[in-house]
Amino acid sequence: MKISKAIIIFAILTYLALFSTIWLHEIGHALVYFFYDCKENLSVTVPLYFANASPNPLIHERVGNLNANQIFQVSIAGIVVNIIFGLFSMLIVLIYKFHWNRFVLFFISIFGLTHFLEASSYLTICNIIPLSDMIGIINYNKKIQLPLLFIGILIVLLMMYYIMKTRKEWRKFFVIYSIITFFIMGGLRLFFTLL
């Protein structure tokens, strides 16, 4: 009975980490849109099933007046937020050796990992096949595409290191979760970009 309760708690924490990662990514976009007066507030749209999340509602006539540099800033803001939260979470887990409650430690670990997955899937998959946010980034400057791909690969390597430093009993789940989530994120962006 204890094992099944723990599995349910871990599943809920994984869902919350994924949802909050996508929500924070969209908040990154929303902050820049708000700064450029294209939003009246910082609300965003993130369905419970995650797909097709966006910084909407937007003032679309003002969005249409943004220049290429402003579109670049909006486009990269979500990725930057993911990298910041991923690094912050990783540092908390690896540097501070508190005697964490296992559920708290699991949440912080999966939260950081999911942020890295979001950022790296944009910088690799969505960079090779320009999709979603990467379209605005690459349209601004095609020369940035290769350095961002390199950063994406470095984040993947960082994720691998991070997984190896987490609790041994979680590693297999984190590897499987990472592979599935990485490709689903890229696949959903492809689907919604082509839609």
Image: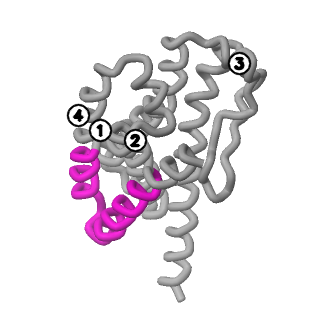
- Would residue 41 be seen by someone viewing this image from the given angle? yes
Residue picked out by circle 2: 126
Residue at position x 51%, y 27% from top?
Answer: 75
Q: Nearer the viewer, residue 32 or 187?
A: 187
Instruction: Mark 3 or mark 2: name the one nearer the start of the chain.
Output: 3
Residue at position x 62%, y 48% from top?
Answer: 52
Q: What residue type is labelled 3?
A: Cys
Q: How far apart are marks 2 and 4 (CA)?
A: 13 Å
What number is the disc on residue 38? 3
Q: How far apart are marks 3 and 1 (CA)?
A: 29 Å
Task: Classify 10 Å Cα crowding around label 3: few (below 14), some (14-19), many (20 and above).
Answer: many
Examine the structure image and report whether residue 176 is included in the region drawn in magenta: yes
Q: How far apart are marks 2 and 1 (CA)?
A: 10 Å
Horizontally, residue 106 falls left or right of residue 165, namely right
Residue picked out by circle 1: 152
Residue at position x 73%, y 27% from top?
Answer: 58
Residue contact at pointers 1 and 4, CB within 8 angstroms: yes
Of marks 2 and 4, the one in the foreground: 2
**In this view, 146 is above or below 48:** above
Q: Name, please, the residue furthest toward the bottom.
A: 1
Magenta part of the protein: which range?
156-185
What number is the disc on residue 81? none
